[in-house]
Amino acid sequence: MTSILKSTLLAASLSLASVPAVFAQNPTVGGAAMSTNKNIVENAVNSPIHTTLVAAVKAAGLVDTLASPGPFTVFAPTDAAFAKLPAGTVDTLLKPENKGQLTKVLTAHVVSGKLSAGQILARANEMNGRYPMKTVSGDTIVAMPEGQGLAIMDESGGKTIITIADVDQSNGVIHVVNNVLLPK
């Protein structure tokens, strides 16, 4: 009886060992768990390193858009990324009279469809190291291999690095980035 129980437990543990990808945890962002059952906005609100982004999305009136079914790929700048902008830039963009400009900046970080970092890297490698992506704002950003990861360049030549990749959402994926992309 004991050997049957041991065999059953061994078989169960071996079968579980072959399934971890199905139950693999989503990366945490700023120490906060990100749920694949929540949309982009719901998860961003829980991220302690995206408070500026959340405030900007609310000020631009993009909450409903980014909570919609999508799917979207979002290159999400951290609070530290926004802090790198010239003094007063964020405060100026958050003013109601600058809503159009703020919307343009934010939507320059969003691509239609759900693209994992691996898919983006593979496409960049297929295209001689540069994969252009059309953003929701109408701008083009270019992904390229950078060290062991991925860099994204805006139309002005500004570059950001993906610091946390493949944070799956119910309506797409977020890639955390360390700089703000600026549209032309």
Image: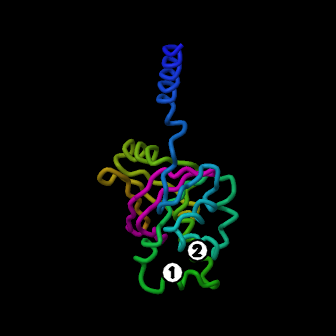
**Residue at 54% from the left image edge and 56% from the top image edge:** 33
Looking at this view, name the residue that lies furthest to the left: 147
Judged from the image, the secondary structure of the residue bearing numbered disc 2 is helix
Q: Dot 1: what SS?
A: helix
Give x and y (percent) for residue 146.
Answer: 32, 54
Question: Which of the two labelled residues, at mark 2 and mark 1, occupies the earlier sequence position?
Answer: 2
> Which residue is under mark 1?
90
Residue 47 spot, x, y in % from top left = 54, 64
Is disc 2 in contact with disc 1, using a CB cutoff of under 8 Å?
yes
Looking at the rendering, which quadrant does residue 111 occupy?
Answer: bottom right
Q: Nearer the viewer, residue 18 or 61?
A: 18
How many C-alpha atoms fall within 10 Å of the one at disc 2: few (<14), some, or many (≥20)? many
Label 1 is placed on what type of residue?
Val
On the image, the x and y values in percent for residue 166 come to: 49, 50
The foreground one among 46 and 133 is: 46
Identify residue type, mark 2.
Answer: Ala
Q: Give the vertical position of 149 relative to 183 (above or below).
A: above
Residue 32 image point, x, y percent? 52, 60
The answer to which of 21 and 115 lies nearer the viewer is: 21
| Marks 2 and 1, how far apart at CA | 8 Å
Which residues are the magenta region? 156-184
Q: Quick one: label 1, few (<14), some, or many (20+) residues within 10 Å?
A: some
In this rendering, the answer to whether 49 lies above or below 24 is: below
Residue placed under numbered mark 2 in the picture: 56
For the N terminus, the quadrant is: top right
Which mark, residue 161?
none
